[in-house]
Image (tube, rainbow, N blue to C red):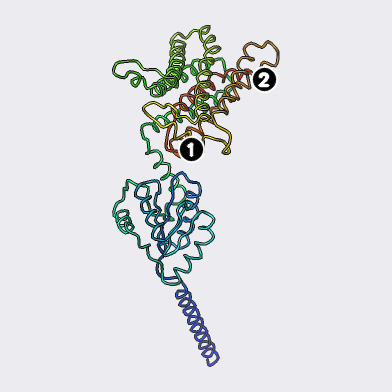
Amino acid sequence: MKMLSIKGNLFYLLFLLSSIIVFTANVQQCSAQPTGSVNLILFCVPDNIDCRTVQNEFFTEIKEDYGDQISILSIDNSERQGSLLFLKILIQYHVPFGKQLPFVVIGQRNFSGLSEISSELPKIIKQGLENGGINWPEVDGIKELITNLRNSSNSSTNHRFINNSSGFIKSQLDFFTYQFQKDIIGNQYALWVLLGLIGCTIFSGFLFLQGKNQTTSHGLILFSTVFLFLGVIVAEHLANIQSLFNDRKLTFSGDSFLTLSVLLLITLGFTWTLFALIRKSNSFNSYWFKWIPTLLIMTCLLCAGYLFSSGILQAEAACGAIGDCNAVQQSRYANLFGIFPVSLLGILGTLGITVSWFLYHFCELKIKNYFGLAFYSFSSFGTLFFIYLTFLEPFVIGATCFWCLTSAIAMGTLMLISTPIGITAWKNIR
């Protein structure tokens, strides 16, 4: 009995000692946790890659690490209110003008550029939390803006608080929505064209995988008719016919002549395709399949050539009453790798389509099948590239080019028309 009593007391003492050690460790750990909160301001513009990296990656991770201990106010420097606040901070903090965005203000310190922010800011945040926190910068207008944002769930600006619950996907969706709302009417047309291009690609790919080109001509003509009808609407907005009649007098210019030419080509293509759909004649459809690409190729060449020439001459592009072709032309997406104009790529691609189409129909050699497959490949690649460009315009650039949309519709229709050719050519090559 005495031995059991000793063992029981020993177990009790060990349990008590371990409890004291665990409690002491928890107390020390709690006391070591940073206290207070850190508040900072981030100045950005929506279309800056470094800004988006800081917002969607760097600060999202910071919020996941510190949670509610840190508050990050992101201010859109492209808006008037944001640019005025940025100017006040530059003056108050004696910061040289021309500082690189993104720009962060925390306490009495500021950091500029992605590299400086990512390397220096984490240390400042940690020190601030250990020292009891960092208040919002004392700048006129900041407190009012913070109050308005916290009290209003639907803000009309792009100023917002960054939090870890939004994450990368929601931040990107917010950015896409904001860019789309810059020109809702013009960007809606881009969205319809984008959906049409995706539909054309899926339909063409399905037919190619099925490998049946004899029974699909009517479906292709129907799809082409609908898509070209959208093209007529887009080209009419591009031509802006009402603006040609000023004071009941017809006024012409070089730009208006080109836009009317594009409208005429698309309208002829739509009318011819509609007749082919209605007549349901195999001979007429064969004639349509052979010659309708000429109208579409001319449309693509006119659009790409006009945009390339206006870019080289640094002249304003005519864009009708809706859209902003010049915003698209001046964006960084107008050039591949910053040096190669996308419009020039469009010209070269369309020339490739022209050569392959011509040689397929008028070359009697056995290699004509390779040209037929090249015709389908060029038009398919062009359509996929237009899907990429047409997505960028409303959701990333925030502006729509109706020259681009018209050319995209012509290219998508070319892919549909070249699908039976590609199927036949692929079967013969195999």
| Mark pair 2, 1: CA separation | 37 Å
Q: Residues within 10 Å of mark 1 (few under 14, many from 20)?
A: few
Q: At which x and y percent is residue 255?
A: 44, 22
Q: Which residue is mark 2?
A: 370
Q: Is residue 317 above or below residue 7?
A: above
Mark linked to residue 18: none
Looking at the rendered structure, the secondary structure element under dot 1 is: loop
Residue 211: x, y in percent? Answer: 59, 21
- Return the x and y of residue 158 as percentages of the image width and height: 37, 47
Identity of the amino acid at label 1? Ser
- Residue at position x 53%, y 18% in the image: 297
Q: Along the line of sight, which residue is nearer the eye, 168 or 204?
A: 168
Given residues 156 and 423, the one toward you in this image is 156
Q: Are marks 2 and 1 in contact (CB under 8 Å)?
A: no
Element type where label 2 sits in the image: helix
Closer to the camera: disc 2 or disc 1?
1
- In the rendered image of this protein, does residue 404 appear above or below residue 249? below
The amino acid type, in three-letter code, at marker 2 is Tyr
Which quadrant, please, contains the C terminus? top right
Q: How many marks?
A: 2
Earlier sequence position, callout 2 versus callout 1: 1
Q: Residue at x 70, y 12 (%)?
A: 365
Q: Is residue 93 left or right of residue 420?
A: left
- In the rendered image, the vertical position of residue 299 relative to residue 175, given as above or below: above
Q: Position of residue 108 (x, y in %)?
A: 42, 65
The residue pinned by badge 1 equals 331
Crowd class of label 2 (few under 14; some 14 to 19; many from 20; radius 10 Å) = some
Is 374 left, or right, of 32 in this rendering?
Answer: right
